[in-house]
Image (tube, grey):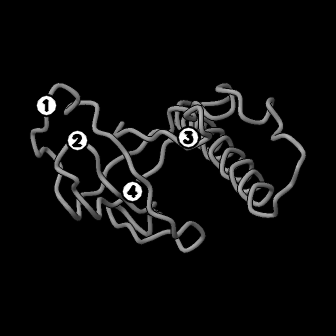
Amino acid sequence: MMDWNDSGESQRVSADLRSLRARIIGLESKVQLLTGGLAPLPAAALTPSIWQQEIFPARITVDHQDGTYDARRQVATACNTFADDSDDTAEITLGNVAERGGYTGALAVGDIVLVRFDGLTAAGQAIYHVW
């Protein structure tokens, strides 16, 4: 019989696996694009059912003062302690949905936020928002 703690752990592990699958697919797509592969990207691999659950911590590095920010992916090193993810060193641009109606300066450089992948633009660029 599974108690509440086992169920919570199972859900956490499932979410981690979905996030890892999404990152692997993203990296495979980048490699394919960088190597000039002529084959189309696999549409099934980029469906929202795979990507929708990718949520990860990130550290704000630049405030563009328009409701968008640059950030670096973080990994948890201890309780409430984070470090830059050495496997993913690229900075991403993310939007703060709470500031959609007008910039409020709610976030500052150095803040750690949860980021959610919200799909791809028509140009194939990832869309990220503060979750």
- Could you tell me which secondary element the residue under label 4 belongs to? strand
* Residue 92, above or below 2: below
Question: Toward the viewer: 81 or 111?
Answer: 111
Task: Give the CA distance from mark 3 to mark 1.
Answer: 26 Å
The answer for how far apart the CA atoms under marks 2 and 4 are is 16 Å
The residue wearing badge 2 is: 67
Residue named by callout 3: 54
Q: Nearer the viewer, residue 106 or 82?
A: 106
User: Mark 4 sits on what residue?
Assistant: 58
Nearer-N-terminus badge (2/4): 4
Q: Residue furthest right?
A: 39
Q: Secondary structure at mark 2?
A: loop
Instruction: Mark 4: give few (<14), some (14-19) or many (20+) Cα within 10 Å.
Output: many
Q: Is residue 73 above or below residue 123?
A: below
Closer to the chain start, of discs 1 and 4, is 4
| Residue at disc 3, secondary structure | loop
State if disc 2 and disc 1 touch (CB < 8 Å): yes
Residue 96 sits in quarter: top left
Q: Which residue is mark 1?
A: 102
Residue 72 vs residue 99: left or right?
Answer: right
